[in-house]
Image (cartoon, grey):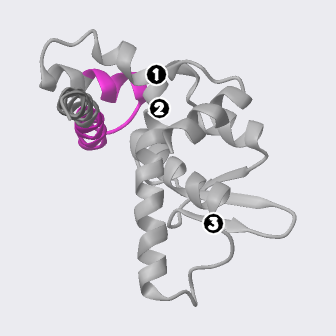
Amino acid sequence: MEDYVQKMYESIDIYKPEQLDMETIASRLGVSLILEETNSRCMDTYEDCFIFIDSRLSDQQQFEEFCHELCHAMWHMGTQRNMPLPYMLYQEWKAEGFMLQAAVPSFMLESVISKAHYKHEAVALISKTFGITEDTAFKRLKQHLLKVQNHELNEQFQYKMKRIYRYL
């Protein structure tokens, strides 16, 4: 998913956190963005795609909702109205993961968190830099740290396996 998000942003000339603006992203992707007092949702017709964002939300929450709905616009078709519950829950889980990546792309994150000395500083810096809530910034930082930890564990495992096979 992170490769997809990076390629998507690079295809519309977005490379820095300050360029992450829902109006710009929607426009460059050919999606109509509508802010109004309604629940956030995505509506896809055969010709057009509309993302409705609840205007009563904070700017941070609006951006997070936009990134969530953008997943539905880019990856999902049709309506969830008649969809089996497990599949709908799967789509929502994917959209939540997409939101974390789209709101705080991996290819932009490392340079931001390298400026922080402590986890709470990193959360505040991510929140401020990417225009998201601290709760979402914490989730994204946790996701990133788990990925780094898994990568390190995998490398240690590979190293040990090579040593074992060398003696067989």
Residue placed farthest to the front in the image? 168
How far is the residue under mark 2 from the one under mark 3? 20 Å
Quadrant containing the C terminus in the rendered view: top left
Instruction: Write down the residue under mark 1.
Output: 108
Image spot of residue 125 (x, y percent): 28, 20
| SS at mark 3 in the image | loop
| SS at mark 1 in the image | helix
Q: Amino acid at mark 1?
A: Met
Q: Is residue 37 left or right of residue 142?
A: right
Q: Amino acid at mark 2?
A: Pro
- Which residue is found at the position 39% from the left and 23% from the top? 109
Q: Residues within 10 Å of mark 2 (few under 14, many from 20)?
A: many
Mark found first going from the N terminus, 1 or 3: 3
**Residue span colored magenta:** 125-147
How far is the residue under mark 1 from the one under mark 3? 26 Å
Q: Is residue 54 above or below residue 138?
A: below
Q: Quadrant of residue 149?
A: top left
Q: Looking at the picture, tell me which residue is in the foreground, 51 or 83.
A: 83
Q: Is residue 7 above or below residue 53?
A: above
Q: Amino acid at mark 3?
A: His
Q: Quadrant of residue 163?
A: top left
Q: Quadrant of residue 25?
A: top right
Residue placed farthest to the right in the image? 47
Q: Is residue 72 left or right of residue 109?
A: right
Mark found first going from the N terminus, 2 or 3: 3
- Residue 145 sits inside the magenta stretch: yes
Instruction: Write down the residue under mark 3.
Output: 76
How far is the residue under mark 1 from the one under mark 2? 5 Å
Instruction: Write down the residue under mark 2.
Output: 105
Which disc number belongs to residue 129?
none
Q: Looking at the picture, tell me which residue is in the foreground, 46 or 144.
A: 144
- Which residue is found at the position 45% from the left and 40% from the top? 101
